[in-house]
Amino acid sequence: MTHDVILFLAAFLACAVEMVEALTIVLAVGVTRGWRSAIIGSAAALVTLAAVVVVFGPALTKLPIGDLRLVIGAVLLVFGLQWLRKAILRASGFKALHDEDAIFAEEQRAAQAVSPAASGLDWYSFTVSFKGVFLEGLEVAFIVVVFGSAQHNISLAALGAVAAAVVVLTVGLVVHRPLSRVPENTMKFGVGVMLTTFGTFWATEGAGVQWPGNDASLVGLLAYVLATSVVLASVLRRRHERLVRAGAVA
Amino acid sequence: MRYIVGFGRFWYDFIVGDDWRVAVGVVAGIIAVYFAAHHGANLWWLLPLAVPVLLGVSVVRAARPRPE
């Protein structure tokens, strides 16, 4: 049960943050150059991502669960620590925060600089939208396949991603501007913590080790990874403030 | 050949990212846990201990002020 809740939450949060970023790109292109090609490009990317999940997900679940968890745990731990590293650097001020308004303005400038399509499909809009949705969505597809197969529950992970996509798209359609108020950086921090927790749990289990308290230890591990990440971010934030006062960084 | 290199680089950037030392540390930790487990030792605490160490070293390195 705990596994399922965290699995759903991780897929939901990861998809939500990536969808917010993809939405900014598609909105900028759609508002500037028209919606038809931007929507076709986005839809083509979503179909491609769904195909990735459908092809690789069931294939992975056929592998023995122990070996699968060892490999997936290792990949997930490396991938999760990468997310967490970026999130901690952002939270402490050493890396710029994601600014959807700035990205939207930049994408609009780029879209205006290209001459408009004469007729038919606007390939600029199609390509930028496809690339934006596909590249942002690839991390989600990866998380859905990896998480879902290690838990033997691809459909729950996919459901989390689809739920997030529906929420973000609905809000995006209503407000018709980039979702700059979404606490994107905090959500990324949360996803990094979950990926790292599951990676640690599965890699250890897959290596043939028994966790004290078995599955119940997952909650303790989640709290531990969260606490150590918050402490690291807080120590680095103080260090950043000292460096700013000393004029060593901007 | 160019496409194979590009494909490999994409997945490297995608999974490993900016600091390869973290990935090496994770793999070394998992190998240690695996071999210990197959010799009767239950090192369940090793990876949880490695996480803040690897993360801490990596972010502190990234946060060092660069010379102008």
Image (tube, coloured by chain):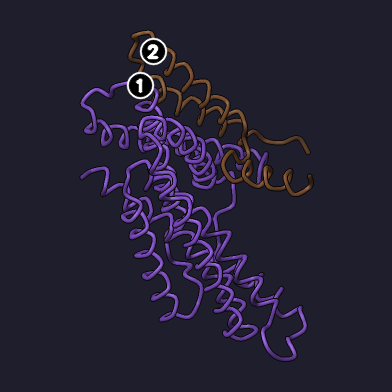
Chain colours: A purple, B brown
Residue position marked by numbered label 2 in the rendering: B38
The residue located at (72%, 80%) in the rendering is A112
The residue located at (49%, 61%) in the rendering is A51
Crowd rating for badge 2 (residues with CA inside 10 Å; few <14, some 14–19, many 20+): few
Alpha carbon of mark 1 to alpha carbon of mark 2: how far?
7 Å
Task: Measuring from the top left, give residue B68's x and y in whole percent.
Answer: 78, 39
Task: Measuring from the top left, give residue A36's x and y in whole percent.
Answer: 58, 85
Observer-nearest of A188 and A105: A188
Observer-nearest of B17 and A162: A162
- Can you tell which quarter of the image residue B23 is in? top right
The residue located at (65%, 76%) in the rendering is A108
Chain of residue at mark 2: B
Mark 1 and mark 2 on one chain: no
Crowd rating for badge 1 (residues with CA inside 10 Å; few <14, some 14–19, many 20+): many
Q: Is residue B57 left or right of residue A3?
A: right
Mark 1 vs 2: CB contact within 8 A? yes
Task: Measuring from the top left, give residue B37's x and y in whole percent.
Answer: 37, 14
Secondary structure of the residue carrying tag 2 is loop
User: On screen, A220 above or below A57?
Assistant: above
Residue position marked by numbered label 1 in the rendering: A208
Observer-nearest of A60 and A248: A60
- Can you tell which quarter of the image residue B46 is in? top left
The residue located at (72%, 36%) in the rendering is B66
Q: Amino acid at mark 1?
A: Gly
Q: Quadrant for the N terminus of chain A, please.
A: top left
Q: Is residue A185 left or right of residue A159?
A: right
Q: Amino acid at mark 2?
A: His
